Image (cartoon, rainbow, N blue to C red):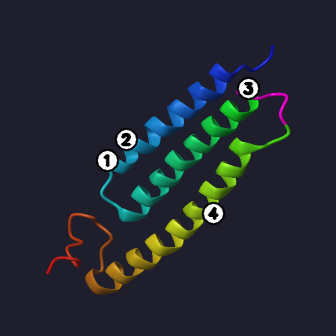
Amino acid sequence: MSLGIEHYLILSAILFSIGLYGALAKRNAVVILMCIEIMLNAVNIAMVAFSRYLMPDTVVLTGQVFAIFIMTVAAAEAAVGLAIIITIYRNRRSVDVEQADLMRG
């Protein structure tokens, strides 16, 4: 049995849904950050699948290049996000997003 584009898109949709649920329902900032990473990886899967199945004969790896770019941005986002979370934890002794009102004037 061959895997078609619909299999990859279903996997991507499931991962994105799990990440979206976690980002909206959870209160812990670290878990929210991990859920955002899951959502970005779901987009990577979809982009590579579209690139592979819509342009199979081309040498240009457009989807793969964009996926690497997204991974780079996600790594930077994780580093900045974790630095912010550590700073909030040092000041508030909690990573609950409802208690993180540090940015308010």
Q: Earlier in the sequence, mark 2 or mark 3?
A: 2
Identify residue for label 2.
Answer: 21
Figure quadrant of residue 54: top right
Q: Position of residue 47 (x, y in %)?
A: 63, 38
Which numbered disc flags the more N-terminal residue, 4 or 2? 2
Within 10 angstroms of label 4, few (less than 14), some, or many (20 or more) residues?
few
Front one among 88 and 44? 44
Q: In this rendering, which labeled residue sits more in front, label 4 or label 2?
A: 4
Magenta residue span: 53-58
Helix, strand, or loop for circle 2?
helix
Name the residue carrying label 4: 72
Report how far apart the C-alphas of labels 4 and 3 lie in the structure. Answer: 24 Å
Q: Is residue 55 magenta?
A: yes
Disc 1 marks which amino acid?
A: Leu
Who comes first in sequence, dot 3 or dot 1?
1
Q: Are marks 1 and 2 in contact (CB under 8 Å)?
A: yes
Magenta segment main secondary structure: loop
The CA span between labels 2 and 3 is: 29 Å
Q: Mark 3: which secondary structure?
A: helix
Judged by depth in the image, the label closer to the viewer, 2 or 3, is: 3
Measuring from the top left, give residue 74's x and y in whole percent. Answer: 56, 61
Query: Residue 24: which numbered mark, if any?
Result: 1
SS type, badge 4: helix
* Quarter the C terminus occupies: bottom left
Ranked by sequence position, the earlier of labels 1 and 4 is: 1
Q: Label 1, label 2: how many angstroms apart (C-alpha)? A: 5 Å
Spatial distance from mark 1 to mark 4, Cα to Cα? Answer: 24 Å
Q: Amino acid at mark 4?
A: Thr
**Between marks 3 and 1 in the image, the one whose residue lies nearer the viewer:** 3
Instruction: Return the x and y of residue 92 as percentages of the image width and height.
Output: 26, 81
Q: Is residue 4 above or below residue 68?
A: above
Q: Which residue type carries mark 2?
A: Tyr
